[in-house]
Image (cartoon, helix red, strand yellow):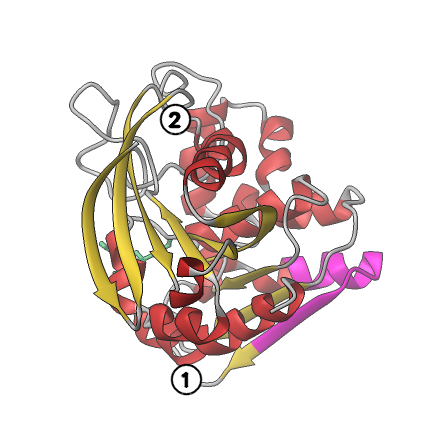
Amino acid sequence: MERIERVKEAGGWLERYRHDSTSCNCPMTFSVYLPPQAQQGPVPSLYWLSGLTCTDDNFRVKAGAQRYAAELGLALVIPDTSPRGEEVPDAPERYDLGQGAGFYVDATRAPWSHHYQMYRYVTRELPALVEGALPLVPGLRSISGHSMGGHGALVCALREPGLYRSVSAFAPICHPVRCGWGEGCFSAYLGEDRRAWEAYDATCLVRAGAEPIELLIDQGTADEFLAEQLLPEALEQACAERDFPLRLRRQPDYDHSYHFIASFIGEHLAYHARALGR
Ligand SMILES: N[C@@H](CCC(=O)N[C@@H](CSC=O)C(=O)NCC(=O)O)C(=O)O
């Protein structure tokens, strides 16, 4: 992997890398924040999955997470939200399909399947790459994300017991098989058989008996996507039925934006730091 940017922040280093992804069959870009403690030895890491239309840049510029990561001694690993490039299929007239909208699934349908392998990229390829090359403790990681990335974080943690010490999400898409964003992407990437979609749906995974891990979720009550796309009540009901540990905090008057994320990111980082033994 090639480092293409490095800037000092809060005593640590915010870096950006480019590498040829064997999962996505194209060059991929990601960012990493290494806190000051990483200069003394390996640190645990928090993976952050961003939402629709984002690159690795949105979170590092808007969330204000690096200051907390520096205090806690946590690295931040921030992948892109999809494969990109001229040869990568896209739906340029739509913001909710194609580039910027990988939905953290491994696509099985042409023309998407050759490049859109974001699930294996995030859960396998990227951890192996960064934990082998940077001062990160191998295997000591947690995961979080926003909206489409909140969905991704929940699904990765529910499908991969033991891969993450903790999981949290901001305004996640909780039941993608039942909302427009999810239906649009899943029908394109996974085909019309809705049973195949359930493997990438947090509500369905809980209902199907996923191994318990506490789900910490913050959801703004003034979120413009709440009623039609996010459906937290479906996940809440599934968790209640299964006695699955869910901490869903409804935050009055917050919308879907990074202003909401910036307001609570410190609490999420502290939550993950505890789980990671910091
Ligand atoms: N109407 C917007 C829709 C895109 C949007 O709101 N993206 C959110 C994530 S939504 C779910 O995944 C986001 O994080 N945007 C980037 C940001 O920096 O705020 C549009 O047309 O773009």
Q: Say which residue label 2 marks.
A: 116
Amino acid type assigned to the residue bearing label 1 in the image: Asp
Frontmost of labels 2 and 1 is: 2
Q: Residues within 10 Å of mark 1 (few under 14, many from 20)?
A: few
Compared with 29, 232 (above or below) is below
Is 104 in the magenta? no
> On the rendered structure, is 124 left or right of 57?
right
What residue do we see at 37% from left, 58% from top?
34
Q: Position of residue 193 (x, y in %)?
A: 58, 23
Q: Position of residue 83 (x, y in %)?
A: 31, 31
Q: Is residue 262 visible?
A: yes
Amino acid type assigned to the residue bearing label 2 in the image: Tyr
Label ID, residue 253: 1
Q: Is residue 255 visible?
A: no
Q: Position of residue 66 (x, y in %)?
A: 35, 68
Q: Which residue range is magenta in the image?
A: 235-249
Q: In which quadrant of the rendered view does residue 80 lie?
A: top left
Ligand 1 is found in the corner quadrant, namely: bottom left
Please tell me which of labels 2 and 1 falls first in the chain.
2
> On the rendered structure, is 134 left or right of 162?
left
Decide which of 65, 114 is in the foreground and name it: 65
Decide which of 3, 103 is in the foreground and name it: 3
